[in-house]
Image: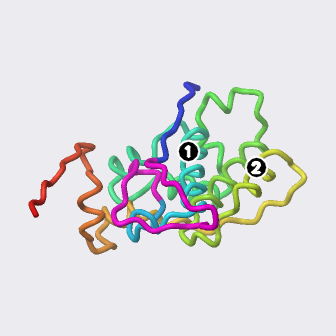
Amino acid sequence: MIPKISDFGMAKLLENDEIQSTTGKAVGTRGYMSEEYALHGKLSERSDIFSFGVTLLEIVTGKRNIEYCNYYRGDSLLDYVWRHFDEGNILHVVDPNFVDSSLVEEELWRTIQVGLLCVQNDEDDRPSTESVALMLSTSKMEIPLPKKPNYFYARLIRGEIASSSSVTESTSINQITLSAIKSR
């Protein structure tokens, strides 16, 4: 139960009438980047929802997604949580500090379900910021069932995604950052 402030990567200002943007190269914190941003440079509100969902699942489980991906090669924290959610056994993934707290199992289910909705592959399947706030603040709102997440970084490690220069240059498995200088 050590609180942390999360950094979802680099912030990018949008024009007043823009709801999404595209960048030339993904820059941010591995483990929190959505697929559409990391692989295609497409940045939107739903990219932040993905990052929030990862953070929510990390808080509930007490584990970090990127460490899980690197330790269990080709698997992710999102897959791990999904398997237990799908089997109806979420207490197995919950940090023991939460199990012994005043939180009830229903709140834990709700939080994990919202987290899984936030990390859906297709950005259109992710809830809006307003919906997330409502789902977390009221127990009367029905929450849709999430689909199985298929986290791109775990697929990249498994070799299911062909390496692209933007991904290989901006990510590092051993958490060392290398910069390549290109002359003009």
Q: Secondary structure at mark 1?
A: helix
Magenta span of residues: 9-33
Horizontal placement of 150 versus 25: left or right? right
Horizontal placement of 110 versus 77: left or right? right
Q: Secondary structure at mark 2?
A: helix
Crowd tier of the residue under label 1, counting other residues whose Cα lies within 10 Å: few below 14, some 14–19, many 20 or above: many
Q: Residue at x 44, y 49 (%)?
A: 10
Task: Measure how far apart labels 2 and 1 are at the Cα level.
Answer: 15 Å
Q: Quadrant of the N terminus?
A: top right
Question: Is residue 68 on the magenta stretch?
Answer: no
Q: How many marks?
A: 2
Q: Residue furthest front?
A: 16
Dominant secondary structure of the residues highlighted in magenta in the image: loop
Q: Where residue 182 appears, x then y in whole percent?
A: 12, 59
Give the numbered dot on residue 133. 2
Q: Are marks 2 and 1 in contact (CB under 8 Å)?
A: no
For label 1, the residue is 55
Question: Is residue 29 on the magenta stretch?
Answer: yes
Disc 1 residue type (three-letter): Thr
Q: Where residue 149 appears, x then y in whole percent?
A: 54, 65
Q: Quadrant of the C terminus?
A: bottom left
Q: Which is nearer the eye, 51 or 90?
A: 51
Chosen colour scheme: rainbow
Q: Which is nearer the eye, 37 or 69?
A: 37
